[in-house]
Image (tube, grey):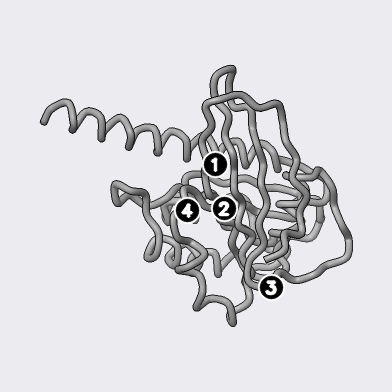
């Protein structure tokens, strides 16, 4: 499948880790624009709906000794593609669930997306993958969801965190992705450490 995104590389060092992060949510909430802003630092006004799934790669110099490759799966939000989500979610390490601050239904539907991920995807030790809730289009003055409601909702439904973002202006795009990358890295490393500990005990 053709990749609509260019690949952009930061300075790389070894060793490298590869994390798959899925980007999901209702149609038109800004998933594709968000990924484009994060990977290419560009914003395109013309909207073209994702068909199935699109892929992007972001390489991060995470520390002086570690490089992380983020494989981003921008998954279509239309119902006709939901039967494929188990395939798309396979082996994911982290998840971003996005809604449009000006569209209340897209916020309500994030619970459906969260339950779908939790039922189909988990870390190797059986724990749920970390899911971050993103409230996109914060650059628009008209909003249908207030911060207090989002804060309560994300706690009740076990999201690892939430923030407002603007793919158009670039607000909190890098910060939110750094947060999900950090959580994913910690959870994967904890699993590796536990495996080593179990092996040592045996």
**Residue that label 1 marks:** 180
Q: Which element is circle 2 on?
A: strand
Quarter of the rendering containing residue 75: bottom right
Q: State the separation of the CA atoms marked 2 and 3.
A: 18 Å
Q: Single out the mark in the foreground, 2 or 3.
A: 3
Q: Which element is circle 4 on?
A: loop
- Marks 4,1: beta carbons within 8 A: no
Instruction: Please name the residue shown 47% across and 53% down the image.
Output: 92
- Marks 1,2: beta carbons within 8 A: yes
User: Which one is earlier in the sequence, the residue at label 4 or at label 1?
Assistant: 4
Residue 92 image label: 4
Residue 51 image label: 3
Instruction: Please name the residue shown 50% across and 70% down the image.
Output: 85
Relative to 94, is 196 above or below?
Answer: above
Mark 3 is surrounded, within 10 Å at the Cα level, by few (under 14), some (14 to 19) or many (20 or more) other residues, namely: few
User: Which one is earlier in the sequence, the residue at label 1 or at label 3?
Assistant: 3
Mark 1 is surrounded, within 10 Å at the Cα level, by few (under 14), some (14 to 19) or many (20 or more) other residues, namely: many
Residue 96 image label: 2
Relative to 187, is 123 above or below?
Answer: below
């Amino acid at each position: 499948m053709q990749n609509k995104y260019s690949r952009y590389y930061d300075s790389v060092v070894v060793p490298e880790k590869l994390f798959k992060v899925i980007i999901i949510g209702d149609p038109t909430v800004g998933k594709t624009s968000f990924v484009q802003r994060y990977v290419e630092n560009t914003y395109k006004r013309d909207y073209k709906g994702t068909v199935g799934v699109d892929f992007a790669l972001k390489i991060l110099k995470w520390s002086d000794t570690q490089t992380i490759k983020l494989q981003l799966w921008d998954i279509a939000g239309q119902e006709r593609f939901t039967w494929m989500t188990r395939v798309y979610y396979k082996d994911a390490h982290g998840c971003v669930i996005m809604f449009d601050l000006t569209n209340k239904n897209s916020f309500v539907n994030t619970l459906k997306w969260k339950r779908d991920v939790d039922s189909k995807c988990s870390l190797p030790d059986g724990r749920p993958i970390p899911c971050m809730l993103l409230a996109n289009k914060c650059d628009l003055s008209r909003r249908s969801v207030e911060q207090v409601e989002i804060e309560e909702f994300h706690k009740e439904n076990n999201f690892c965190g939430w923030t407002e973002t603007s793919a158009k202006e670039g607000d909190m795009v890098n910060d939110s992705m750094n947060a999900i990358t950090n959580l994913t890295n910690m959870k994967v490393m904890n699993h590796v450490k536990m495996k080593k500990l179990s092996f040592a005990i045996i």
